[in-house]
Every structure is written in C-alpha cells, then in structure tokens.
Amino acid sequence: MARTTSSDAAVVAALGVPAPAAPGSFASRLGRAAVLVAFVALVVMLGLTLAPANALELQYAVSLTLFAVATNLILGFGGLVSFGQGVFYGVGAYTVALGWMHHSLSFTEAMVLAPFFGAAAAIPLGMLALRTRRLYFSLLTLTLSQLAYVIAENQTNLTGGTNGVFGAMVPSWLLDPHTSFLFTVAIVAVAIAILWKIVHSPFGLVLRAIRDNRERVEALGVNVYAHELVAFVISAFFCSLAGSLFVVYSQSSYPEILNWTASGVPVFMAVIGGMYSFFGPVVGAFVYEFASHYLIEYTQDWQLVIGVVLLAIVLLRPDGLAGSLGSLRAWLRRRRPPVDGAPAAAAAAPESGGGPS
Amino acid sequence: MARFLTETIGTLSDAGSLFVVAAGLTLVFGAMRVINLAHGTFYMYGAFAVTTFAGTASGLRFWVAVVVAALVVAALGAVVQLGVVRFVVGKEPLTQLVATFAVLYILADVALHLWGSGARSVSAPLGVSGTFTLAGAYLPVYDLVIIGTAVLVGLVLWLLLSHTSLGWMIRAAVDDPELLQSGGVNLRRLHLAVFATGALLAALAGAIVTPQISVAPGMDQSIIVSSLLVVVIGGLGSVVGTAFAALIIGIADTVGTLVDPTWASTFMYFAVILVLVVRPWGLFGAPER
Amino acid sequence: MKVVGNKRRVRSYLTALTVAALAATAGTAATVSAGASSGGTVTVGESTTLSGSIAELGQTGLQGVQFAINSINAHGGLLGKHINVVSADDAATPATGASNARNFILNDHAVAMFGPIVSSVAAAEEPVVTQYKVPIFFYISNDVALLTQDYTPYAFQVVPNTVMEPRAAADYLAHMVGKKKITIGTFAPNYSFGTSTVAGFIQALKDLHVNYKLVNQQFPPLEATNIAPYLSALVAAHPEYVFNAQFGGDLVTFSKQAAQYGFFKHTKVIAMYSRYPLQSLGAGAPAGAIGFDRAPFWALGKTGMNGTGMAAFINSFKAKYKQYPSAWAIMGYSAVQTWAYGVKKAGTFAGAKVSAALSGANVPTIRGTLNLRACDHQANVPEYVGTVSAKASAKFHLRLWDNVFVAQAKDIMLTCAQSKALRG
C-alpha cells in the first residue's frame, strides 16, 4: 500500500475528488467524533450493566459489526460483491480453535496470527477471484466459500470435520462475560478506526473511483487490479479478526461459519444498514443480529421476516437504513435553509461517494 | 466393464437431473440477465409437491403428480416473477442476488409450514422400480427415466431456442430489447413466460428425482450451489454449455469418489475454479461487456 | 451431488450462532446449576434431533424419556419434587446442541441432560455440561471418544459404544463366514460416529482373524438427500458384504436405493436394522441382511434384557403410541432411571454429587442391572445381532430377525486400561 500512496494522491488530484484531509469543517468533525465517543460509551455501559446472557448477545453483535464493515470495504467502497468473506472469517476462527486442538498455538499467539493468516489466504484467492468481474466475481467467491466449507467438513484429522471444534479454547481470564465483552469492544473499535482511515485515505478514494468509473481510473494509469487486490486482502485481514472474536464468544469453530450463506450474512448486513455509508454496516449488523436473535425466540418464521425486510430494503431503499437517514436529513435541510451553506448531498452522507453511476 | 457401466449410468443420471435444474437457471439468465438464487427453491417445491400429490400410491398417479407438481410450481414462479423479479431486471447483480436470496428465505419458511421439517420419500412407480442387467452390471431402471427426461428436455430446449421465433425473441431480449419491442413483442410477458418455464424445469427435476432421494428442507440451498457451479462452468445463458457442464460436474464427482473420498466433494469446486481461470466467462459463455 | 449434504445445518447456522449467545457465561454462571430448581419442581433437559431424516429416532427417544419421567412423577416424584422435561431440536448440528444445553442449564436451571442422537452434538455438549457441572446421559449417541478422548466425570453412556457395537456385528459375521475369504465395503455417515464405528468394525475383523479384503469405503454426509454418487461407487465395487453405519431414515433411503440396483441379491448388508427401518421398509426389508440393534424389544424373551418393569413398559408404550418402543425409547427410559437412581443415592440434585454417586454404581433398570464402571462411565450393556427375517413375525406382525445373537458387554467392551489409554 505504501508504494501506491503517493501515486494515489496524484490520481485523487487528477480525478478532482475533494482532498481527504479536510472532510468537513473542524466543528463538524468534532461533532462527529463526539457522537462516536458517545456511541462507544453507550455500548460499553450497556455491556457492563446487562445480564450476562444479554451482554454476550451484544458482544456477538459488536464482533459482527467488524465483519460487516470489513466486508463493506470491498462491497460498498470497492463495488466488489463477494459471497466469500466467510472464508476469511472461518480462517480466523479455525486458527484459534485448531491452535488449541492441536496444541500448536497459545490463545494469544492464535489471536495475533489469525488476521495475518486470513490476509495470507486472501492473496492467492484474491488474485484468482479478481480475474473475474461483477456477477462472475460473486459466483466465484461463492464457490471459494463452499470449497472452504467442504474442506473443513471433510479433512477430519486437521479440522475436526463435521463435528467442528468445541472445548475450553478460551483462557479462563476471558471467560467472564463482561471481560470478554470489553475485550471485543476494544479490538473492534481499534479495527474499525483503522478501516475508517483506510477508506478516507487516497487509496480509499481511488478505490471508490474505480467502483464508480473503472475505465476512467484505468485511463489515468492506475493499476486497478492491484488496488482491488490490496482492498481484498485488507478486508480479509479484518474479516479474520472478526472470526477470531467469534471464538472468544462461542468457544467453538465449525464448518457452517464458512459456507456461502454465512458469507452472505455480512453482505446482507451492509445492504440493510447502507453500503455506501461507512457506518451503515454497523447499523445493519445490530439490526440483523438482534432481529434474528429475538425473532428466533418469538417466532419460528424468522427467515420469513428477514426475507421480507431484505426484500423491502433492496427494492425500496437500495442505499439501506443509512441512506434513508441521509434522505431524511436532506429533506429536513431542504425545509430549513442551510445555515453553513454546505451542499445538501454532502451533508446527507459525508463519508459517501454516492452510489455507482 | 460392469463396474464402469454402473459408474457411468449413475453419473449420467446425476448429471441429467442437474442439467434439467441448471437449464432453467441459465434460460432465465439468458433472457433476463438475472441470477435467481431462489431457483433451487422451485426444485425443492417440485419434490415436496410430488410427495403430496403422489401419496403412497405408485404407478400412473406418480406420473400425474410429476406433471401437476411442475405446473403448480411454474405458477409459483410466475408469482415470484410478478412480485419480485420483474423489479430487479436490469439492476445491479447485488440487488438481484439479495432480492432472490430473500425469496429463497421466505419460501423456505413457507415450505416448513406446508410440509414440516421431517424427511419424506416416494417409491419409484411400478414398471420402472426394478433392476435391469447390462453386460453383467445390475442397474436401476429408474436411472434411465432420469437420463431420458434430461435428453428430452435438452432436445426440446434446443429446438425451441434455435428453431422457433420464441428462441429468437429470448436471445434478442438481452441483445436488443428496443428492436424486440418495436416489433410488437411484450417484453414483460416474455420475461414472465421464460421465468415460469425456468421454475417449471427446476420443479420437473425435483419431481422426477423423488424416488431416488429423501425430500427434506435444505434441498433448496444445496441444489442451488450445484446448479450455480454448472451454469458458471457452462457459461451463463448457454443451454449447450449447461449440458456439458452438468456432465463435467457429474464426472468430477464420480472420479472424486474413486480417487479419494475425503477430497471427493472438492473436485467440482476445483473444476469451476479451473474453468474460470482459463475462461472467466465459462466454456460457452460470452465475455461480459 | 455432494453438497446436498448441507441440509438443515445450513439453515440452522443462524439459530446456532444467535442462540449460542449464552456461550461464555462461564465462570460466573457455574453456580446457577445444581439444586437451583425452585419450588416443588426440578427440570431436566433433552436436546435431540427432532427434524430431518433421523427425526423419528429423536422423537421416539424423547418419548422414552418422557415415559420414565411420567412414571417417576406418578410415584411421588424424586426427593419429593415433580420432574419437568424441557426439550429442543438440535437439527443434528453440534453448535445448536451446545447452545440448547446452555439455554436449558442457564435459563431453565436443568439439573440433568439427556440425549442427543448424534455423537458430534454430544461432543459439543460435553464441555458445556462440564463447565456447569451438570450430568449428561448419552443413550443414543455412542462414539467411544465421548468417554475416552473427551472424557468428563459428568458424562454417562448407557448405550453400547462404537467399539462394542461393531465388535458384536463382526463377531456374528466371523461366525458366519469362518475361514472363507470375503470382500467388504463400508458405508457410513461422514462424522465422528460413522468413522469411529467403521474403524471399530475393521479393527474387530482384524482381531477376529477374518480373511477379508476391503474393496470400497464411502462416507456420505449425515442426512444426505442424495446418496446416488456414493452408492453407485459402492455397488460398482461389488463387495460381498457391506458394513453400513447409517441409521433411521438414512438407512431406509439406502435400502430403497440399493434395492433398485438389485444390491441385496448379491451382497449381505450389515446395518442397524432396528424397529424403525424394518417398519418403514415393510415388505421391502432386505431378507438375509444382518441387523444389529441396542435394545430390540422382540429379543426380550431370549436374552438377559429383562429387568423389572420391561414388560409393563412395552405394553403401556404400545397402548399409548400404538407401536412397539424402539431401542431408543427403551434406552431413554433406562437413562432416566439411571439418573434417578443417582439422585436418590446422593440425596441431592447437585450434579457433582449425583455423578460421584453413579460412578461405579450398579443401577437397576428395565434392561436389567447396569454397571456404570468407574473408569469411564460406560454401562455394561449388551448388543444384539440377527438376520433380517423373510417373513413377518406372527406375534409382532413385522419383519424382524432370525437367529438372534446377544453379545455380552464383557466380551465386546474395551478394558479400563484400553479406555484410559485412549484418553490421551
């Protein structure tokens, strides 16, 4: 990435995209930071005061927000619809679980290595998958996901096979629900902050430019394939991190977390929350996770409800809940004349590059 | 020789049913540029419908049940087309995938209400339930029924697509929709017909294989994966490619079980990856513009 | 196609994930379990497979458990308390089973667990019950690893394990073929139970000096909807004998499919032809095939399996459900009796004390007196083997077995030393 940065900055200038260094006035940045801090504080407070079972549910939702945001790096900002991020989520989870099962890695070592293993796996897989475009890319990543799934299911000596791996793989200091909750929140917060920096770096802007107008960016001499590959690997790194957090929560790893429906989950979260907004997938993850959790308790028909919600969003609000919020704000602003003279569109979704043209 | 025959007939039968399902998927894609993730749902509904209509009686009633099941599911396909798919034609692949996946979820739940969560089975109808011998191999007569159905479906589709005006319209629907509409063709009606036919093919495959499988929830998600592999290898939109690809998948599967059972189920995925590396648009497909 | 095996597991992925929310409540929750049942009732939990092709086994096992609990309640309960059963479907998925167990223990304050069917699910439940110190009684799942590699003082197995069961079948086969050279194929579900049972069978053949050649081995997924590719590979290899470790609806599907190949004419299949498959197959049951079962009601008169109350149980079960109890129901009943004996002996519902009281105990059950040996908590239960009959039994109106053979536990069990060596 370091290699591409300077040229990325040049490309950004050539494309005439607003410089990333000044995404709004100081006051608006401060305001946004305050909202974020307040949100994290709220989550932490909730986690500490809730009953253990509910705190765990919240912990799981928090870890899924990372999965969704990491997936959205290539989905929303890269325009790459991957049904294969479950592979990397699974690599993360299995690194911790198998490290324990084969007595080869301590928990800490496994947690540290998990994202790097995911990134390492993403290099060949990304090189392969990015040879294809659009729908074929989706279908090839789906295939990779299923391939990882059947390997995990059938290589019993290595992975525990269909049984999966269950056991005391999480150290006792991390078993207390509140400790494991804080542990998860801390890791997810740092990871999401890094992803935010990446999205708003010149690299992130070029990525969005590729999504919006591939040919034009290519004409500027940008190596599109390399940019997409780097984004794919970064996404995989954080998907794996989210997968290792799944083990902290569930104390297990099993083949089903790798298959194509599992890979679809972060995509659905991004779609529900809004994939053109950085924090949309966070909202989507909370909505999806809590909806499905409580739906299972109250109705057998959770699939039906989630199906209807997905359908409604994708047909009526393709930019998700965050997009709806943006439109609402834009509508409110139109009713009241803007005070600071900011363009309505920019105000609606400051971190968005807009949908693909 | 006996061993070879047993494996061959088994492979052909498997490839045959897969071809019929995947042909529906690729037909819809060819005419509408929509990948329908709920296509496997029609297969499952076809199978469940047969368990309902055929009851325990076999013989003539089974064949009637197969036809009724296929027609009923074709009607369901029309409903899905009118209610959902027609709104995503021409949209981004993501929109299409998510919308049709939502349909898969919704119909999976409806199926649980209709048929419960247990497994169901149907016996092969009299006359085709037995065994025949060929060069010392004992083979299921019913395999021939499946292979015959697949060949028939393949022939009909080929005639339809290359020798009728409907086939021309289906091809033109993607290449030049304006020309088609200026010629007085109602594109929406054409899409409806194609989508219902796709559903019918999936249901027919599901219905015809019931004597050889146990019918249970979850069939929808597993068959859609196999059919996607087939249409990707064959090239999206190509019926001929689908036939070849179904054979490739069937052979990959059989060779896999012979070579190394623990890796057998990965063979078909490697086949897909191999094909896409060499020809990212599939064997008989066209590069995306 | 191979991927057809995913089935319910795919669907239940989300269920598993979300319900597993209660997961690591670990340390803090370890205190909630024992004796926390309030008022005049205590709760026991059964997570088992109630959907899919093996659902019948889960349902009938649950019926046996419920029957035994009803009987205890009718006789004044246990330590003066009424027993309540909570149950849930695990969809044959380990993660779902583990979260069900956690839910029962944390939310319903279950003091004991029964089930499941599937050994992989049982293995996933073991760390949970160990964490919360709740005894679990395996009466269907029987992987030997559950009491060896995965040993926990809280697990008890009242079913012949995956060493005992195939060993009994191998004994029968060895007796049948003598010194003759035979070819063998195996067919088993692709998870711990299947691989473990097949390994147990092959080991037993070696120990018995059977002159065999292994010609084909297939491992289709559990609850696979389409076994055609696996089956045609097996058929093509032309084995004289096939050891099949499938069960329930999966075995029924196999038998119907294999019959389409005329397979039973030339090949003797050795499989768990218990009541359910025999009843489902009816006239299509393969005469001459070798069946094995863990507690067949029809073998009652001929064997030692005649503990107090067995006849009464069979009659009242038949009266209530209009069919004879499956082995799963009989074993479920005896599993509850085992737990109740431990509670009475310990004088408390507290898991640690109940487990300690049961270790090495001789427990009177409807299957006779079961010894739960102290070294690994395996009950000394026999296994039954017979040949599927060509005609329906006059008494039971079902195609059952001829030449029933009872393999006594002492002849088929691992020694304590062997069992401990496997613990690793």
Image (spheres, coloured by chain):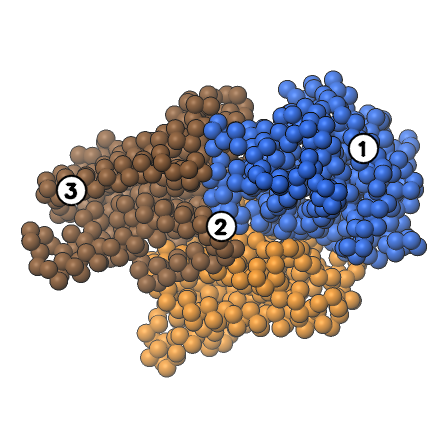
Chain colours: A brown, B orange, C blue
> Badge 2 sits on which subunit?
A
Q: Secondary structure at mark 2?
A: helix
- Mark 3 vs mark 2: give the one in front: 2
- Left or right of A331? Residue C411 is right
| Residue at x-position 58% and y-position 73% | B71
Label 2 packing within 10 angstroms: few (<14), some (14-19), many (20+): few
Q: Secondary structure at mark 3?
A: helix
The residue sitting at the left extreme is A340
As drawn, the label of residue C364 is 1
Q: Position of residue B178 (x, y in %)?
A: 32, 74
Q: Secondary structure at mark 1?
A: strand
How many labels were placed on the picture? 3
As drawn, the label of residue C85 is none
Q: CA distance from mark 3 to mark 1?
A: 73 Å
| Residue at x-position 21% and y-position 42% | A35
| Residue at x-position 34% and y-position 75% | B179
Q: Which residue is mark 3?
A: A31
> Badge 1 sits on which subunit?
C
Q: Which image quadrant is residue C417 in?
A: top right
Q: Nearer the viewer, residue A253 or B211?
A: A253
Task: Identify residue type, mark 1.
Answer: Pro
Say if B180 sits above or below B149 in the image. below
Task: Identify residue type, mark 2.
Answer: Glu
Q: CA distance from mark 3 to mark 2?
A: 38 Å
> Badge 3 sits on which subunit?
A
Whether residue C344 can be seen here: yes
Q: Which residue is mark 2?
A: A297
Q: Are marks 3 and 2 on the same chain?
A: yes
- Left or right of B62? Residue A94 is left
